[in-house]
Image (cartoon, rainbow, N blue to C red):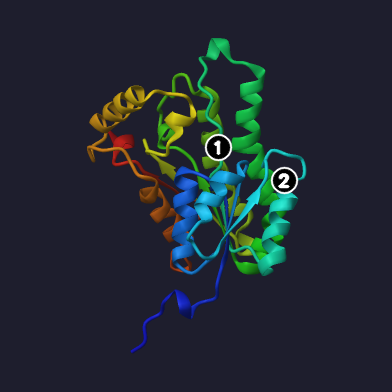
Amino acid sequence: MTHSSSSDRARRTVVVTGGGTGIGRATARAFAAGGDEVLVVGRTARTLAETAAGHAGVRTLTADITAPDAAERVVAAAVEHSGRIDVLVHNAAAVLPEPAGSLTPGSVRTQVETNLLAPLFLTRAAVPALAAAGGTVVCVGTAAVLGRRAFPGLSVYGATKAAMDFLVRTWAVELAPRGIRAVGVAPGETDTGIGERMGWSAGEIARHQAEAAARTPSGRVGRPEDVAWWIVRLARPEAGYASGTVVAVDGGASVV
């Protein structure tokens, strides 16, 4: 009897946006650990280099995914190196808290362009390569928009993530004839370091995470690796019958 392993299958090419920190970093490293070739995309060369350091198979591309030519650049960088794209992970996101009565045009545009328009155009550009490989699109959303929940202070961010869940369902139908699957993960409160990047103090972060843990049945906030595990598994060939679904990875918080 023989057992398959990562060395027994073709080396896949995986593209991960927002790969310099948090869930994107953990996802890139998890795919690489399984033997895949990973292109991590982000705006900051330093953090991308930290993601790749010590992880064979991880390459970096410094790019603003909202730029007019970004989608074509990302696809070209992946295809020129390996000739294929097997998995496209839409992880990059902008989170800019503002109440509805004080929304500023700049923050709205940044969130819509980063969280929604960039994935739309990158998917469009990647479809030929994904179709050739029988590939998978994975959208990283948020469990905060599941069901009939509100998201006070983060209406624009939440609206873009709800839109991504809709895209998962729609792409699963539209792209199925071309052999492409679409799936999503909806993380709950996860310690991605976003609090520090938003300028919160250590005390504010600790209080926020303690409150989140208290309302989560699992009794803790998530780790980036918790979410990365599901992204990697949903993109595996063995998960090929799953399409159009969004998996909550939130410790049960969305069902209480």
Q: Secondary structure at mark 2?
A: helix
Residue kind at label 1, given as amino acid type: Ala
Q: Does 76 sit above or below residue 134?
A: above
192 w.r.t. 112: above or below: below
What's the amino acid at mark 2?
A: Ala
Q: CA distance from mark 2 to mark 1?
A: 15 Å
Estimate how packed mark 2 is, as few (under 14), some (14 to 19) or many (20 or more) residues with alpha carbons within 10 Å: some
Residue underneath mark 2: 70
User: Residue 179, can we see it?
Assistant: yes
The C terminus, quarter of image: top left
Q: Is residue 73 left or right of residue 130?
A: right
Figure quadrant of residue 65: top right
Picture residue at 52% right of the left edge, 35% below the top:
161
Label of residue 215 in the image: none
The image position of residue 190, as x and y in percent, is: 37, 38
| Vertical position of residue 252 compared to residue 148: above or below | below
Q: Nearer the viewer, residue 73 or 122?
A: 73
Q: Residue furthest top?
A: 101
Query: Which quadrant would residue 103 be assigned to in this image?
Result: top right
Q: Position of residue 33 (x, y in %)?
A: 44, 64
Which residue is at the far right? 69
Assign a secondary structure to mark 1: loop
Q: Residue at x 44, y 51 (%)?
A: 26
The percent position of residue 117, horizontal first and vertical second, equals 66, 38
Q: Earlier in the sequence, mark 2 or mark 1?
A: 2
Answer whether residue 18 is visible to the viewer in this image: no
Q: Residue at x 41, y 37 (%)?
A: 143
Q: Quadrant of the N terminus?
A: bottom left
Q: Position of residue 119 (x, y in %)?
A: 63, 44
Is 4 rendered above or below residue 188? below
Per the image, the residue denoted by label 1 is 93
Observer-nearest of 44 and 38: 44
